[in-house]
Image (cartoon, rainbow, N blue to C red):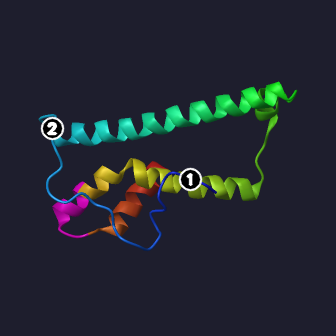
């Protein structure tokens, strides 16, 4: 799979911003929400363009992809892959929430973060 969202469970260097994050609104929660909305809007714009491109290419080749997509029912493997992608997406979407939690606790609190993701899933 070629995802643009980093795998939150992959080992490696933790990518964080050093120093204080800029604050644009009086309430830091609004800044967090703004970051999440912008991340989601970016993802949606990319997805829209990719789906539109695939449908247009398919139509040019005589394949009615829109109709095929409406009838498609994913199997177990596809559902598992989609769930794995969704978890990575949520990790990216709630990145600022996790960073703020880390800052407030002075350490990573993986159990609390995973509980939060489970609650919203």
- Report x, y in % for residue 32: 27, 43
Residue named by callout 1: 3
**Residue 27: numbered disc:** 2
89 or 76, which lies in front?
89
- Residue at horizontal 44 percent and vertical 33 percent from the top: 41
Give the answer, above or below, for where 46 lies relative to 14. above
Give left or right: position of 49 versus 8. right
Give the answer, above or below, for where 121 lies relative to 61. below
Q: CA distance from mark 1 to mark 2?
A: 32 Å
- Residue at horizontal 24 percent and vertical 58 percent from the top: 101
Give the answer, above or below, for where 73 lies relative to 113. above
Task: Indicate the secondary structure of the residue bearing disc 2.
Answer: loop
**Residue 26: numbered disc:** none
- Residue at horizontal 49 percent and vertical 39 percent from the top: 43
1 or 2: tag closer to the N-terminus: 1
Give left or right: position of 105 versus 83. left
7 or 114, which lies in front?
7
Report the magenta residues as a range.
100-107
Task: Indicate the secondary structure of the residue bearing disc 1.
Answer: loop
Residue furthest out toward the bottom: 11
């Amino acid at each position: 799979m070629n995802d643009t969202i980093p795998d939150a469970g992959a080992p490696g260097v933790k990518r964080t911003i050093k120093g204080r994050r800029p604050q644009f609104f009086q309430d830091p929660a609004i800044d967090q929400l703004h970051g999440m909305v912008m991340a989601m809007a970016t993802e949606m714009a990319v997805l829209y363009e990719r789906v539109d491109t695939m449908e247009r290419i398919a139509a040019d080749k005589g394949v009615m992809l829109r109709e095929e997509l409406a009838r498609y029912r994913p199997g177990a493997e596809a559902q598992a892959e989609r769930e794995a992608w969704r978890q990575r997406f949520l990790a990216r979407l709630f990145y600022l929430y996790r960073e703020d939690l880390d800052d407030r606790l002075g350490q990573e609190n993986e159990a609390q973060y995973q509980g939060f993701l489970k609650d919203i899933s």
